Image: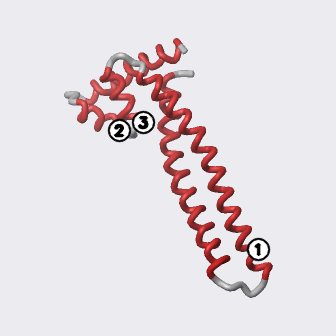
Amino acid sequence: MQAKDLMEQVRKAEEELELIQAKRQHYLSIGGVQGSRITGMPSGGHSQESRVENAAVSMAELAADLDRAADAYSKLIVEAEALVNRIEQINFRKVLTYHYFLGYPLPDVGRMMGYRDSKSVYHAKGYALMELQKQLDRG
């Protein structure tokens, strides 16, 4: 695998985790609202209560599926962070962390790190990815 591809996957994983978290919270709130109807409101018939219970269970199952997907994304991020942390040069680690893990645009990273021009931060990112590739090749 190429270092740049790995870091792009990390960026995507961060975005996916945010989406998963929002969807999970939504599904659980739907299931919770429907679940409270089961105990809080009298039902006109048993079949109505069963449908509501089934909907609540379905929402909980969707949330559990999202948890499994989040675990896979989290594992990718942890593995990538371990590789980045093996890079000796702190500026390279910072560029990769700010840009890929935290999602800052490169011009902002350059300003935060005190680069005088935008070309410098792009060069630093390139060198950082080369160092990361060495870590990937070492295994």
Q: Earlier in the sequence, mark 1 or mark 2?
A: 1
Residues 27 and 116: in front is: 27
Q: Residue at x 49, y 23 (%)?
A: 3
Of badges 2 and 3, the one in the foreground is 3
Give amino acid for label 1. Answer: Ser
Q: Is residue 37 above or below residue 133?
A: below
Q: Residues within 10 Å of mark 1 (few under 14, many from 20)?
A: few
Distance (Cα) linking label 1 and label 2: 50 Å
Residues 87 and 120: in front is: 87
Give amino acid for label 2. Answer: Pro
Q: Residues within 10 Å of mark 2 (few under 14, many from 20)?
A: few
Q: Residues within 10 Å of mark 3 (few under 14, many from 20)?
A: many
Distance (Cα) linking label 2 and label 3: 11 Å
Residue on which the image places disc 2: 105
Dividing the picture into quadrants, the one containing residue 96 is top left
Q: Secondary structure at mark 2?
A: loop
Residues 137 and 125: in front is: 137
Quadrant location, the C terminus: top right
Q: Secondary structure at mark 1?
A: helix
Report the disc number at residue 16.
Answer: none
Q: Badges 2 and 3: C-beta atoms under 8 Å apart?
A: no
Image x and y of residue 66, in percent: 61, 50
Q: Residue at x 62, y 80 (%)?
A: 40
Residue on which the image places disc 3: 101
Residues 13 and 26: in front is: 26
Quadrant location, the N terminus: top right
Left or right, 92 with reference to 114: right
Of badges 3 and 1, the one in the foreground is 1
Report the disc number at residue 50.
Answer: 1
Image x and y of residue 113, in percent: 25, 30
Q: Secondary structure at mark 3?
A: helix
